[in-house]
Image (tube, rainbow, N blue to C red):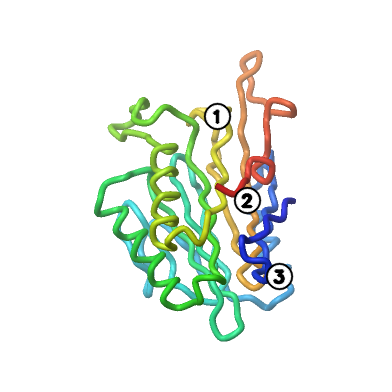
């Protein structure tokens, strides 16, 4: 677990909790949802847009509100979490999208950031960027899709800084250097506990050893909460 304070001392920090090496990611997320101490309602970000969500096929963005957010199977996909505060309550949004820096995709992200800033006092806002795989931008070609996770992550950092006029430096959780797209067999999963600004990240990376899959262990592997840092 890692607590990352805001640039503004009166703003509640974001807490990153990691669950690495789990082969039962869905069960772990389900347990946390069931055991939530807030009677929290949850909004899922899935493969298709739900009512009140924005984006398109390559990018889905949740509504902005007090509900918790959950999404599964971030392989080379990236996510952006936005936190704010409205009427003395924490609010959030969560995105799930393929690594893609096309202008129309970035426009959806920009719109979500602006809507959060319009709804909240900008000085109560914070942002977290996570997911993707470790690669050289545009170097991998899988099933006809160019993967550029690091490039997309950098573009999202730039968007947040632009839209907040430099007030907010986002939290970045880069992909593990061991995550090359072949080692992530489950995809990352996330649960956003909006009232407490807690983020639960599930990640399971494997390597092949003597013809069998084995989990990465320290010191090779650093779990998400250890990789998290303020940009």
Relative side of 86 to 221, left or right: left
Closer-to-camera residue (51/59): 59
- Of labels 1 and 3, earlier in sequence is 3
- Tell me the distance, in whole angstroms, between the alpha carbons under discs 1 and 3: 31 Å
Residue closest to the far top: 210
Relative side of 18 to 74, left or right: right
Q: Residues within 10 Å of mark 1 (few under 14, many from 20)?
A: some
Looking at the image, which residue is at 57% across and 45% down? Answer: 173
Q: Are marks 2 and 3 in contact (CB under 8 Å)?
A: no
The disc at residue 201 is 2
Relative side of 111 to 132, left or right: left
Please tell me whether mark 1 or mark 2 is closer to you in this view: 2
Closer-to-camera residue (212/67): 67
Looking at the image, which residue is at 53% across and 48% down? Answer: 130
Where residue 103 appears, as percent x and y from the top left, is 25, 51
Q: Residues within 10 Å of mark 2 (few under 14, many from 20)?
A: many
At mark 1, the secondary structure is: loop
Q: Are marks 1 and 3 in contact (CB under 8 Å)?
A: no
Q: Which residue is mark 3?
A: 36
- Tell me the distance, in whole angstroms, between the alpha carbons under discs 1 and 2: 17 Å
């Amino acid at each position: 677990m890692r607590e990352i304070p805001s640039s503004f001392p009166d703003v509640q920090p974001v807490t990153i909790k990691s669950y690495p090496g789990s082969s039962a990611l869905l069960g772990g997320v389900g347990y946390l949802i069931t055991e939530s101490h807030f009677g929290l309602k949850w909004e899922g970000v899935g493969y298709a847009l739900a009512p009140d969500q924005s984006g398109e096929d390559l990018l889905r963005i949740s509504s902005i509100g007090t509900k918790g957010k959950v999404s599964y199977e971030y392989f080379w996909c990236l996510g952006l979490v936005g936190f704010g505060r409205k009427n003395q309550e924490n609010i959030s949004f969560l995105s799930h999208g393929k690594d893609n820096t096309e202008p129309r995709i970035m426009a959806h992200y920009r719109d979500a950031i602006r809507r959060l800033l319009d709804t909240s006092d900008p000085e109560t806002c914070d942002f977290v960027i996570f997911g993707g795989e470790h690669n050289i931008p545009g170097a991998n070609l899988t099933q006809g899709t160019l993967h550029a996770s690091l490039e997309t992550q950098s573009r999202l950092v730039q968007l947040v800084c632009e839209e907040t006029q430099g007030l907010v430096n986002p939290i970045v959780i880069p992909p593990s250097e061991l995550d090359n797209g072949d080692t992530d067999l489950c995809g990352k999963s996330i649960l956003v506990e909006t009232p407490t600004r807690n983020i639960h990240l599930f990640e399971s990376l494997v390597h092949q050893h003597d013809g069998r899959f084995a989990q990465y262990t320290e010191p090779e592997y650093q779990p998400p909460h250890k990789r998290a840092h303020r940009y």
